[in-house]
Amino acid sequence: NKVLRERVAWLEKENQRLQVKAQKYAALEIEKNRLLVLFSASQSRGDVSVRMGRIIRTTLGRYDQRITIDLGERDGVIMAQPVIDENGVIGQVSTIARDHSVVTAISDASHAVPVEVLRNGLRAVARGTGRSQLLAVPFLSLQADIEVGDVLVTSGLGDVFPAGYPVAEIVSVEAEDGEPFMTVRAKPYAEMNKVKNILLVDEPLLSHIRGADEDGLTKEERAAAQSPIEIIDETSKEV
């Protein structure tokens, strides 16, 4: 009858509403757990001070891998400041505005970071490829001791990134006839297309961030410690 049909229709509508509500609560629970993990990661680095921020925009194009965070000049952000999350290194601050900053991701084709193989301490440089889930590890000789599954961590050279932070895992090692170097690829631990919250690394590491004395770095490692400087003088900008 009509009353029964109306009752069924109401129950179906109410069921849909409750399902949407349940999905929202599930999403909030996931976000809460991520924040707890991020907070735990920040507390575990007693040697380095960090601040938590939030990603407000991502740009993951073929040649432009950047994220925008909700911390800026008013928050004391400085150029080339390292950015990490609970999984590993994300990148460095490359543009600063009053209320936000742009971070060049380690996957950006212009970025490089000094690393070492956790297993044996082999020093190398991880360079961006323009693909969010792929890094290149160039200039490794055919005799270099590196293999699939090896973990790359920051070496601390260049006084920019703290030593020991996870960067990537080696996913392929290839040697071609006639080539002096191997072709090595790695997958970053930080997932640029999923991360929502970040940690901005503060002092004491940053006392040398704008340059270092001659310290035995290779040309590639020194280049990895540098980043373009651009400061935006503005009071408001739509992000």
Image: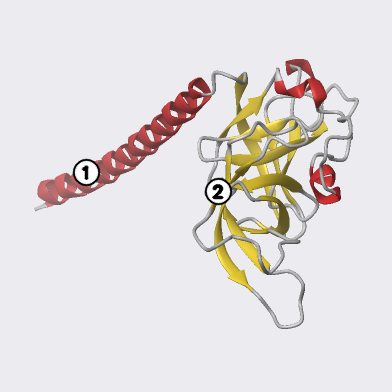
Q: How is the image coloured?
A: secondary structure
Which percent across, then down, holds residue 215?
Answer: 83, 35
The residue tagged 1 is: 10
Residue 57 drawn above or below residue 186: above
Q: CA distance from mark 1 to mark 2?
A: 42 Å
Q: Amino acid at mark 1?
A: Trp
Question: Does dot 2 land on a helix, a strand or a loop?
Answer: loop
Q: Is residue 16 left or right of residue 136?
A: left
Please tell me how crowded label 2 is: few (under 14), some (14-19), or many (20+) other residues with Cα within 10 Å: some
User: Which of the pair 161/62 is nearer the observer?
Assistant: 161
Is residue 239 visible in this depiction of the protein?
A: no
User: Which of the pair 211/123 is nearer the observer?
Assistant: 123
Which percent across, then down, holds residue 161?
Answer: 69, 34
Q: Residue furthest front?
A: 143
For the residues bearing labels 1 and 2, Cβ distance under 8 angstroms: no
Which percent across, then down, holds residue 63?
Answer: 77, 58
Please count the marks in the image.
2
User: Which of the pair 110/150 is nearer the observer?
Assistant: 150
**Mark identifier at residue 191:** 2
Quadrant for the C terminus, please. Answer: top right
Residue visible at 49% across and 58% down? 149
| Residue 134, quarter of picture | bottom right
Q: Earlier in the sequence, mark 1 or mark 2?
A: 1
Residue visible at 54% across and 23% down? 45
Residue visible at 60% across and 68% down? 173
Residue visible at 81% across and 30% down? 237
Q: Amino acid at mark 2?
A: Glu
Question: Does dot 1 land on a helix, a strand or a loop?
Answer: helix
Report the mark closest to the observer, 1 or 2: 2
